[in-house]
Amino acid sequence: MQTSTVGNILEAISVLDFEDQLFVSETLQKRMVELRRNQIALRIQEAEENYRLGKVRTGTVEDLMMDSSDD
């Protein structure tokens, strides 16, 4: 399979009629939203696992600043 560059892809899309370009745009936008949702879901799982393992701390912003200055 040949790897396409962004420029090649944009060039290919630019020759499509308006309706097809709109379809590509809307489809890509929906896919990007779904990708972002998946990334957020993975981050939530990671955060929940850290919480379950006791790898999180609570405190004020001041506490955080004190902890970070100790490093």
Image (cartoon, rainbow, N blue to C red):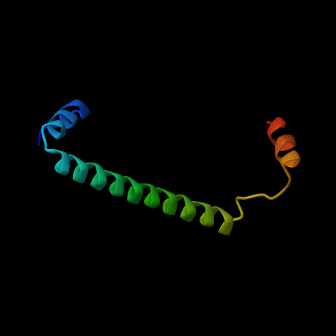
- Residue found farthest to the front: 18
Please indicate whether residue 66 sits to the left or right of residue 28 in the image.
right
Name the residue at the bottom extreme: 52
Percent across and percent down for residue 48 are 62, 66
User: What residue appears at the point 86 percent right and 53 percent down from the top-left corner?
Assistant: 60
In this view of the protein, which residue sits in the foreground, 21 or 11? Answer: 21
Question: Could you say where residue 10 lies in the image, as x and y percent from the top left?
Answer: 22, 35
Task: Name the foreground residue: 71 vs 23.
Answer: 23
- For the residue pair 38 and 58, the one nearer the viewer reads as 38
User: How many discs mark residues in the rendered view?
Assistant: 0
User: In the rendered view, does 50 fall on the left or right side of 22?
Assistant: right
Q: Is residue 68 above or below residue 51?
A: above
Residue 31, position as x, y percentages in the image: 33, 56
Whole-percent x, y for residue 6 in the image: 25, 34
Q: Where the N terminus falls, by quadrant?
A: top left
Could you tell me which residue is drawn at 73 percent across and 59 percent down? 56
Q: Quadrant of the C terminus?
A: top right
